[in-house]
Amino acid sequence: MKQLFGIIVMYIVCLSCNSGTDIEKEVAKIPITVEIVRFDKEFARAKVSDLPYLKGKFPLFFPEEYQDSIWQQKIVDTLQNELDEAVLKEFPTESLLEDDLKKLFQHITFYFPEFEVPIVYTTTSEVDYRTRIIANDSLLILELDNYLGENHYFYSVIPKYIGKNLKPSRLMPDIAATYSRKYIAPPSDRTLLGQIIYFGKELYLKDLWLPETSDALKIGYTEDELKWARENEEEMWRYFIENELLYSTNSKLGQRFVDPAPFSKFNLEIDNESPGMIGRWLGWQIVRSYMEENAVSVTQLMQTDAEEIFNNSHYKPKK
């Protein structure tokens, strides 16, 4: 019996691996052409006399309400020149960026065939990390000065919990998060459960779209923070259940457990050890469990109500 059980387990594991491999083979066949327009490069090399040319070629980056004098000053500004130089040093060519974007767009297209590949523009933003990625149906703007490396001196005054994710390896997860919003139905209520399942869906899409990316990078944790979440999953879940937080509409719960923060706020001694956004991580585990337990498509998942997902996930924290 033990031998038979072992054979069955191995068969299931192999079947799962082959299924994943088959999907990746199909994804790789999807024809995708990525067009990257390096506005940051053009602006970095420009002289004041080139401004009319830049405005004619890139009207998107020159709103009419701004006078030419502003752009002229920016072209010769010392800080802007330093930003341009740092971006060119970190992203000297488009080849790696193009390869990563092609893989991401292929995966999005595999699961959502209606996806339209955008034209990709790269620029700088004076390190405006709140708007690192801008996207609509036809274009994608990447503000590359927000991805120079967590220890870059430009980020010295930025809170560490934010700065740790200002690195090149976070570029694709951030793009994936931006596009996930096109497909995830917004929460139908203001409960904590609705919030964590929403972000659980986002992170699940990253599982599908970025299969080679670590879980830590997907959510924006360090490896130590991810380890803490896994080791304390049962205790955290017990806290949520015993304090009846899941169906609460208290707005402060989002700040405590969902929003980016240096740590999550259980109001316990463990707070300083915990990573922020722990609610998102728990929601991720619930969505993963739901998809393992139910034969539904990814499109259906995106539209399924949070309570239905929770009730049918049979989620049990790992001990």
Image: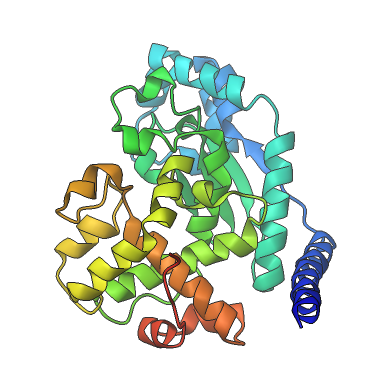
Q: Nearer the viewer, residue 218 or 49?
A: 218
* Residue 64 image-quadrant placement: top left
Question: On screen, 2 above or below 103?
Answer: below
Q: Quadrant of the N terminus?
A: bottom right
Q: Which residue is at the far front?
A: 1
Residue at the image point whose x is 75% and y is 78% from the top = 2
Q: Nearer the viewer, residue 91 or 126?
A: 91
Q: Is residue 73 left or right of residue 301?
A: left
Residue at the image point whose x is 59% and y is 18% from the top = 45
Q: How many marks?
A: 0
Question: How far across and how far down the image is residue 147, in percent?
Answer: 50, 33
* Residue 299 image-quadrant placement: bottom right
Question: How far across and how far down the image is residue 77, in percent?
Answer: 40, 14
Q: Nearer the viewer, residue 220 or 127?
A: 220
Question: How far across and how far down the image is residue 240, in percent?
Answer: 25, 69
Question: On screen, 304 above or below 49?
Answer: below
Question: On screen, 230 above or below 222?
Answer: below
Residue at the image point whose x is 45% and y is 66% from the top = 318
Residue at the image point whose x is 48% and y is 39% from the top = 61
Q: Is residue 269 left or right of residue 116?
A: left
Q: Is residue 98 left or right of residue 40?
A: right
Q: Quadrant of the C terminus?
A: bottom left
Q: Is residue 226 visible?
A: yes
Q: Is residue 50 visible?
A: no
Question: On screen, 277 above or below 56?
Answer: below
Question: How far across and how far down the image is residue 230, in percent?
Answer: 44, 56
**Colour scheme:** rainbow
